[in-house]
Amino acid sequence: MKKMLFQKEYSFRGTHADKVNRLTSQFDSDASFKLFSRNIDVYVLAPIIGFLYGRKSPQDRKGSDTTTKIFTDQLIREETIMKYNYQLILLLDKKHEPSFDERINKAFRYYGNNSPETLTDEELYDQYVLGGIELLYEKLIENATNTEDYLNNLYDFIEEFNERYNETISDEKILDLCALARS
């Protein structure tokens, strides 16, 4: 019997593994500042970012030989939120499935049934994960060389996200969140 999507070890490969490693690594040699503490933290956020920004990416099969993993126990602990993200994306992705009733079936009824259609949905989700990783890397890491750059990138990304999706958060609140990252 095949394990369900979030009940088995997950591996990032190639350039995506490199990017996850950078997203979770310390970016200041004098302090232990990190944008993400663990691979699972990236995996929780990346599919939502990928979906919201319309960014999908196939698995990198030609890049570096790097791999980094999320172990089964971490995925099982976070399964509720991971399943929620998966179901939310399948419910909202009208391009993948135009029929609302079928999106409901995909999100709830077909989840984990190991059909070819479910495997396609899981592959789509994984493409959003990988696309989200690419976008997070580009926005937060790619052009940063020092702590100030990382914090500015984080601020700019939060501000851009705010302008796109949530104009109820003030600039002061964003600055407060950035200040929390430093403490």
Image: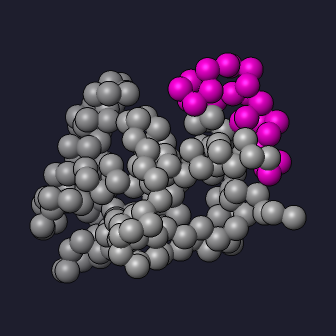
The residue drawn where x is 67% and y is 19% is: 99
Picture residue at 59% right of the left edge, 67% below the top: 10
- From the viewer's perspective, is 98 left or right of 158? right
Residue, far right: 1
Which stretch is magenta?
91-114
In depth, the one of 151 and 10 nearer the eye is: 10
Task: Indicate the position of residue 95 as horizontal and vertical percent values.
Answer: 53, 26
Q: Is residue 175 visible?
A: no
Q: Quadrant of the C terminus?
A: bottom left
In the picture, the quarter occupied by the N terminus is bottom right
Q: Residue at x 77, y 30 (%)?
A: 105
Q: Residue furthest front?
A: 62
Residue 111 location in percent, x, y? 77, 44
Mark yes or no: residue 36 visible: yes
Q: Is residue 40 left or right of residue 145?
A: right
Q: Position of residue 52 (x, y in %)?
A: 43, 35
Above or below, 55 relative to 134: above
Would residue 92 be counted in the magenta stretch? yes
Q: Nearer the viewer, residue 162 or 114?
A: 114
Total label count?
Answer: 0
Tell me, yes or no, whether the highlighted magenta stretch contains residue 178: no
**22 sits to left or right of 57:** left
* Foreground pick, 3 / 175: 3
Please tell me whether residue 14 is drawn above or below residue 96 in the rendered image.
below
Residue 96 lies left or right of residue 59; in this view the side is: right
What residue lies at 53% left-to-right and 64% top-to-bottom?
40
Check the image and tell me how it is coloured: one colour
